[in-house]
Amino acid sequence: MSQDYNIQQTAVDKGSIEAYASLLSKVFNNPKLFTNDYIKWQYADNPDGTILGFNAFSGDSLAAHYVTQPMQAIIGGQKKKGLLSLNTATHPDHQGKGLFVKLADRTYQHAADNGYDFVIGVANQNSVHGFTKKLGFQLVGQLHALLGIGSLPFSDDLSRFSYARYWTPEALAWRLANPNVNYGVSLGHNIVISSATAYPAISATLGVFKGSGYNVSPQKAPFSLLNLWIGANKDITSETNLYFNIPNRLRPAPLYLIFKSLKDNISPLNFDDVYFQALDFDAY
């Protein structure tokens, strides 16, 4: 006999935050990452809005959880209200019941009904099939992962791209307040955000922004001999810089950019015209 689940919209009260942190820690075996403070920062403190998603309960127990995080982007020259597909977890006792698809469908319908224009996300090799085949996402392309030395070219003119995340000063300040990461912040013509990686002497360039309009303080960049860059940007290629493309066999997990329009007037994205940085998702 199939089990009935109680589906409820996500909340961000103290008890809910603790339940999410507990489930995510159990499913991903990473309690150091999914602390209460980290989940509160992700879910409740974002100036673009609190998370939007749904939970499945079995009695009083949280069986499955899916959330998206509000954000803004410039698509085709217009500012759009979107969602970043963020966290999904199903308790081991309730896996294989189709709960992820059910919660995601409810989330996207609720988002469309409440004025959201799109959902964007980054999927790995294990999850990309579910998003594209079961939830109707477009596979935009595989994110580039380059490793090398020296600076990278970044364009100040984002109008050249058909998609770019729109970071308000408040949103960037919140993003840099991640309680789990100490970011490097270099100020100059551009603001360059960096962080350490899991590999000694390798740092990651996470985001580059125009030097004006953002009230951020300089922070010491991590020591590195090599620099990692992950994203999509037609101005950055291994052919024009001292960088090489990391082969898939050497990557911990190839990452894929996925996109789902919630409105009829938003066309599929062209990967070659997308400006997407590591800071635009939750890798660091």
Image (cartoon, rainbow, N blue to C red):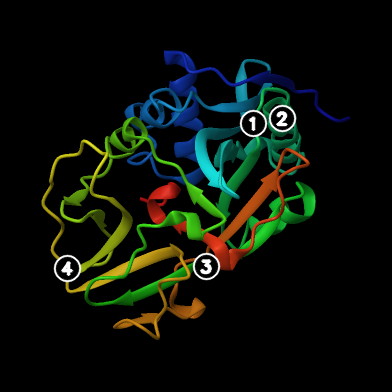
What is the distance, in whole Å, between disc 3 and disc 2 at their CAs?
30 Å
Which of the two labelled residues, at mark 3 and mark 2, occupies the earlier sequence position?
2
Query: Mark 1 — residue?
Result: 116
Numbered tag placed on residue 254 in the rendering: 3
Which of the two labelled residues, at mark 1 and mark 3, occupies the earlier sequence position?
1
Q: Secondary structure at mark 4?
A: loop
Image quadrant occupied by the N terminus: top right
Residue 145 lies in what quarter of the image? bottom left
Please report the residue visible at 46 percent of the width from the left and 14 percent of the height from the top.
15
Nearer mark to the viewer, of 4 and 2: 2
What is the distance, in whole Å, between disc 2 and disc 1 at their CAs?
5 Å
Q: Position of residue 119 (x, y in %)?
A: 63, 42
Question: Dots 3 and 2: beta carbons under 8 Å?
Answer: no
Query: Mark 4 — residue?
Result: 224
Q: Nearer the viewer, residue 131 or 191?
A: 191
Question: Dots 2 and 1: beta carbons under 8 Å?
Answer: yes
Residue 142 lies in what quarter of the image? bottom right
Q: Nearer the viewer, residue 156 or 192?
A: 156
What is the distance, in whole Å, between disc 1 and disc 4 at their CAs?
40 Å
Q: Nearer the viewer, residue 249 or 148?
A: 148
The answer to whether 36 is drawn above or below residue 72 in the figure is: above
Query: Mark 2 — residue?
Result: 112
What is the distance, in whole Å, between disc 1 and disc 3 at their CAs?
28 Å
- Residue 223 in view here: yes
Q: Secondary structure at mark 1?
A: loop
Please report the residue visible at 33 percent of the width from the left and 56 percent of the height from the top.
206
The answer to whether 243 is drawn above or below residue 145 in the figure is: below
Q: Position of residue 120 (x, y in %)?
A: 59, 47
Label 1 is placed on what type of residue? Tyr
